[in-house]
Image: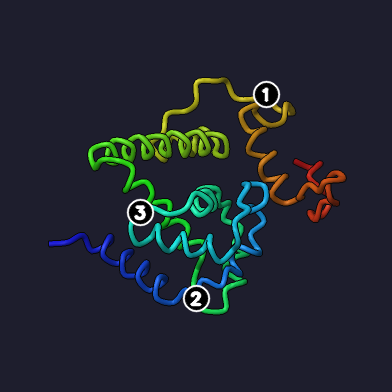
Amino acid sequence: MGNFFEDALQGRVQEIIDACTRCGKCVEVCPVKAPAGVTAPAQEVVSGVIDILRNGDGPQASRRWASTCMLTGDCIEACDYGVNPRFMLAMARLAIAKASTEPHEQRRQGVETFRKLNREVTVQSRMQLEDDLLARLGQKPPPYPPPEAGEGHRVEQVPYFMAVLLALCPIRYNGPAPCPIPNGPARW
């Protein structure tokens, strides 16, 4: 008996392989292509990604493009044939990993990745939730004392707020863009 989830993913991959015309529009609009050093012609890069989906191996430019995807989604809008290039690249990364790693090592890496994600979620929830709510959710309160009234946010929260700020107020080459948030991030 096969794995239903893997069979469904493989079905979607096969649909992508069949639907993709290898026109290269997705590569052309990708904002990560140049910084990643992908200089091969767009059609060759996409054809190589299809090769990776088929057999787990392809040209270096295609492997590089797949491995540096930043999930911008510009490629999805560029495709006129209903292919989701972002999903295609995710499946290419999976095919590369499967081809280069033994099954027992894949399992070990999967377990370690899950544990890392668990730690990250725990840390983020501790950054964002009050101690009484954490206790109700079954998490131990963090080991540091709560801030005194008027002290502001905990030091651990600063990276989270910076990430939110950078996501909402994109930085341009000539400096920060005006913040679109009413009253700006100063009230944080």
Q: Of the residues under marks 3 and 1, which one precedes in the sequence?
A: 3
Kind of residue at disc 2? Thr
* Tag 1 secondary structure: loop
Kind of residue at disc 3? Gly
Task: Please tell me which residue lies in front, 163 or 8.
Answer: 8
Q: Of the residues under marks 2 and 3, which one precedes in the sequence?
A: 2
Q: Where does label 1 land, which residue?
A: 148
Determine contact: label 2, label 1, CB under 8 Å.
no
The quarter in which the N terminus is drawn is bottom left
Q: Which mark is residue 10?
A: none
The figure's colour scheme reads: rainbow
- The quadrant in which residue 130 appears is top right
Residue at 30% across / 67% down in the picture?
Answer: 8
- Mark 2 is surrounded, within 10 Å at the Cα level, by few (under 14), some (14 to 19) or many (20 or more) other residues, namely some
Q: Residue furthest left?
A: 1
Label 2 and label 3: CA atoms lie apart by: 20 Å
Task: Please tell me which residue lies in front, 1 or 68.
Answer: 68
The quarter in which the C terminus is drawn is top right
Label 3 and label 1: CA atoms lie apart by: 55 Å
Kind of residue at disc 1? Glu
Q: Where does label 2 land, which residue?
A: 21
Q: Of the residues under marks 2 and 1, which one precedes in the sequence?
A: 2
Residue at 67% across / 39% down in the picture?
Answer: 161
- In percent of width and height, residue 61 lies at 53, 52
Q: Where does label 3 land, which residue?
A: 56
* Tag 2 secondary structure: loop
Label 2 and label 1: CA atoms lie apart by: 61 Å
* Tag 3 secondary structure: loop
Question: Against 8, is 121 above or below?
Answer: above
- In percent of width and height, residue 138 lies at 38, 36
Residue at 78% across / 47% down in the picture?
Answer: 171
- In percent of width and height, residue 135 lies at 43, 34
